[in-house]
Amino acid sequence: MTAPDALAGPGGGPARALIAMTSQHTMPNGRETGVYASELADAWQVFSDAGFEVDVVSVRGGVPPMEAVNPEDGTQRAFLADPVMSAKMADTPTAAGLRGADYRMLFVAGGHGAVCDLPDDEDLARLTREVYETGGVVAAVCHGPAALLDVVLADGTHLVAGRRVAAFTNDEERAVGMASVVPFFLADELARRGAVRDEAPPFMPHVVIDERLVTGQNPPSATLVARAAVQVARGTATVSRPAA
């Protein structure tokens, strides 16, 4: 049953939300990685509760790797046990065959692997642009904003240029011992594309809404990012961007 205030999709069915994720299994130092399980499951729970049909996509398709799976977490257990999502996760598509106009929401989950392969996925960048330019909401959390680095809009500008963006910070990267492992500091690369870094103290939940772009700083921010994205899609969000 869909939520009473759920958005309608094409043809009158429920609106669709797409969760994008890395296909990277290991970091350069051999550390196992993948999509961060809580970010994936938390977003799924919020979107499902809001009446969205949830699809998934990964860089290389097939079964995406997952990291930080916590069997004690009720939301993760529910996600892993859901038969519909289990079938979708067993054979994720790539972005090449997807159309942005089919989705009201694109949410990019993190995990350290995201900085290794999301920036190079030209099809995902194209899909992200299409979602945004057809009126959808683009959201990303933690290392997920790596997918936004080379998203260029039809007018030739970067999606993040001039926008306030939250992402995993340099201080957080140092705190988890990954500063010398990641190929770049995500926050720095976003700034090089013109993003305005918006940071909270390390590991505190932090969400930024800038028009139809919603970003969050770290795993504890994932549920809040997903909720804010739903509010933006419904037109009920309080936009956090200050007046120029």
Image: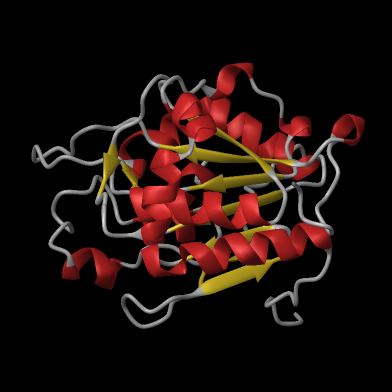
Q: Is residue 37 left or right of residue 231?
A: left
**Closer to the camera, 126 or 78?**
78
Residue occupying the point 84% across, 65% down:
235
Above/below status of 12 relative to 5: above
Residue occupying the point 31% across, 78% down:
202
Residue occupying the point 55% across, 31% down:
124
Residue occupying the point 49% across, 42% down:
147
Q: State the residue lying farthest toward the left.
A: 29
Query: At which x and y percent is residue 171?
Result: 26, 72
Query: At which x and y percent is residue 169?
Result: 34, 67
Q: State the residue lying farthest toward the right.
A: 11
Q: Is residue 129 left or right of residue 191?
A: right
Residue 76 visible from this viewpoint: yes
**Closer to the camera, 102 or 147?**
102
Query: At which x and y percent is residue 115?
Result: 34, 44
Residue 160 visible from this viewpoint: no
**Closer to the camera, 63 or 78?**
78
Q: In this figure, what is the number of numbered marks?
A: 0
Query: At which x and y percent is residue 186?
Result: 37, 55
> Which quarter of the picture shows residue 156?
top right
Above/below status of 188 relative to 58: below
Above/below status of 106 relative to 204: above
Q: State the residue lying farthest toward the top.
A: 97
Looking at the rendered image, the quarter that the C terminus falls into is bottom right
Q: How is the image coloured?
A: secondary structure
